Structure formats: structure tokens, C-alpha cells
Amino acid sequence: MAFPVDRPRRLRRTPALRALVRETAVAPRDLVLPMFFHAALEEPRPIASMPGVHQLPVSHAARVAREATALGLGGVMLFGLPAAKDERGECGADPDGPVPRAIREMKAAEPGLVVMADVCVDEYTTHGHCGVLRTGADGSREVDNDATLDVLARIAVTYAEAGADVVAPSDMMDGRVAALRAELDRHGLGDTAILSYAVKYASAFYGPFRDAADCAPQFGDRAGYQMDPGNAREASREARLDEEEGADMLMVKPALPYLDVLSRVRAQTALPVAAYNVSGEYAMLKAAAAAGMVDEARAVLEVLTSIRRAGADFILTYHAPDAARLLG
Ligand code: PBG
């Protein structure tokens, strides 16, 4: 059957027909809002490169939990800026740090809200790398994979004990999902789920986040642990390893430049798959909208639809509140 019998436009004729045959929808419950809690703030502080996003004082945690619930969001993902950083990121495992405190406040205010917490030392280390450093034979400093696993696992236990439903390792160390699972289980935290940032690329699109979380590396870059943008087969391998280590959900990050990778991971696993529409993706769209180059509302919904269509069950996005209002 071909033209003139076959005419795809027949089903595009009215809004109701289009809605009837639409393959992919976005709902507020598909969206997870990342948030930054700062130990030393009294009032929200705007992040210059991310219009509409703020670093938040912990005293606002209950309020933002109620807002996220009222908007029907799928959950929140917490990041923390500590009062003081240290060489190994040990302050991340402090139960009185900004993330555990915010988790407790949010869960007390909204027990039904899905609270996730990002597990990584980069916000907590003085040097901004995602791992503990060692000095190589030639005197250069490099991230020590295995030495990092212990502190990561202790941070995850701290967040889980504070009440996080989900802990999300984002550091890209090998073996960290198994290390977290073992330490959580040893502490009787067998119900805490692990969302692994299984496929995370060394991306230019994290630029604004590094201001937001004050975690730009003080020397070198993250290419020794985050993935090379040219690699897609390796994404399958990373996803498989994290699934075998016990991840409950997998994430691909960033989203838009890696939709092919997202679709590949979706096809290979039965686990829920998330995608992170990262800070640079958000900042680009906001800048284009502010310059009058795109219609922000339409562009946001199109971006989120494309990420769902490529295979994401849910999306971490700074657009979540605006999108939830648009989807009403
Ligand atoms: C690392 C982490 C990063 C992001 C989330 N977790 C930054 C990095 O790897 O440099 C980026 C998120 C974004 O850009 O929105 N803890």
C-alpha cells in the first residue's frame, strides 16, 4: 500500500486524532528535580548560569518538598555544598551535612515524595575531583579508584540512614555499585535503591553545574574516569556491569547529545532507565529563549518528549517545575 491510498496526514488532521495516536507522552511524574542545598546559606542564592535555579538553605527543604509534591513530580535529586571541604571528601559522610539534613526535613514534611541523593565526593573535596587522590611515581596526582569506594559507600549509608529512598552514585569509579550495595546491606538498608549513573560522559555540558555545586576540578579534567564522547559500545558494557553489580536503575548522562546511547541502553536492559538533561542543556535552552530565538514552553516540552521517546522512563531536569506547570 502506497500513495495515494496510504496518507499519514489523515491521522494528523485534528488535535484529538493526534492525541489518540501519540506514541510518547510526558507527565510530571516522569520528571525529577535536581536541587542544591548549601550548608551556610540563610536565603536562596541564584545560580547565574542557570536562570531560575538557586542554591537553597536547608531551612527551605520542607517547603520545596511540598512544592515538588504539589506539582506531582516523580521525585527530587539532592546535591550538597558543605560548610568546609576536605582532601578526601569525608565531610560527605557527616550526618549533619546539608544533604542528610535536607533529606530528613523533606521526608518529615512529605513522606511520600521520592527523595534521591547524588553520591559523589566532588562537592566535598578541596580539589573538586570525584575521587580520592594518590601521587603517582612521577609525582602527578591521580584519582585512586579503589581507595574511593569506601568513602562513597559511607556517604551512601549516611544518606540512606537519613531517609533517602534512592542513592545515586555519579562518580564513575569501577565497582562502586557493588561497594554501595554491600555497605547498605551490612547496615540493614536493604530497601534503599541504587540509581547508577552507569553511562556518564566527560561532557562540556556540565559547565553551569560546576558553578552550582562549586565542584570544578582544581587541576586536570575528568576524562580519566568519565566516558569518552565517541564511545557507544562501551555504554553497553558500563550498563551491563552496573546491572550485574546490583543497580536497581540505570542512568545515561547527558541526555540530548546521547539519545542514541539512551536508546541502546533501553534496548539492552529490563531495568528502569533514566536520563539527565544536564545543566548545560538547560542553560542553552534558557539562553536561546531569553534571546527570543525559540519559544521556551514548546522547546522544553519537545526536548523532554525526545528524551522519553529515546527510552527514558524518567528524566532529571531543571525544567521540571516549569514543565509540570505546562503539563498541568
Ligand atoms: C558529579 C555530578 C556532576 C553532575 C551531576 N553529578 C558534575 C560532573 O560530573 O562534573 C552534572 C549535572 C549537571 O550538569 O546538571 N557529582
Image (tube, grey):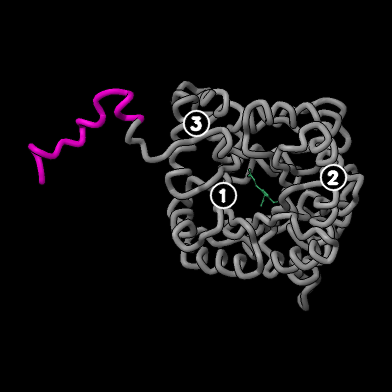
Q: Does 6 appear in magenta?
A: yes
The CA span between labels 1 and 3 is 17 Å
Mark 2, residue position: 100
Q: Is residue 302 above or below residue 184?
A: above
Residue type at mark 2 is Pro
In what element is the residue under mark 3? helix
Does 264 appear in magenta?
A: no
Badge 2 marks a residue whose secondary structure is: helix
Left or right: where 27 falls relative to 169: left
260 lies above or below 76: below
Judge whether 95 appears above or below 211 on screen: below
How many C-alpha atoms fall within 10 Å of the one at disc 1: few (<14), some, or many (≥20)?
Answer: many
Residue drawn at (62%, 38%), measured in percent from left and top? 74
Q: Position of residue 278 (x, y in %)?
A: 59, 43
Q: Earlier in the sequence, mark 2 or mark 1?
A: 2
> What segment is highlighted magenta in the picture?
1-19
Q: Which residue is mark 3?
A: 300
Q: Is residue 225 above or below residue 166?
A: below
Q: Nearer the viewer, residue 290 or 271?
A: 271
Q: Tag 1, which secondary structure?
A: strand
**Mark 1, residue position:** 274
Q: CA distance from mark 2 to mark 1?
A: 23 Å
Label 3 vs label 2: CA separation? Answer: 31 Å
The reply to whether callout 2 and callout 1 are in contact (CB within 8 Å) is no
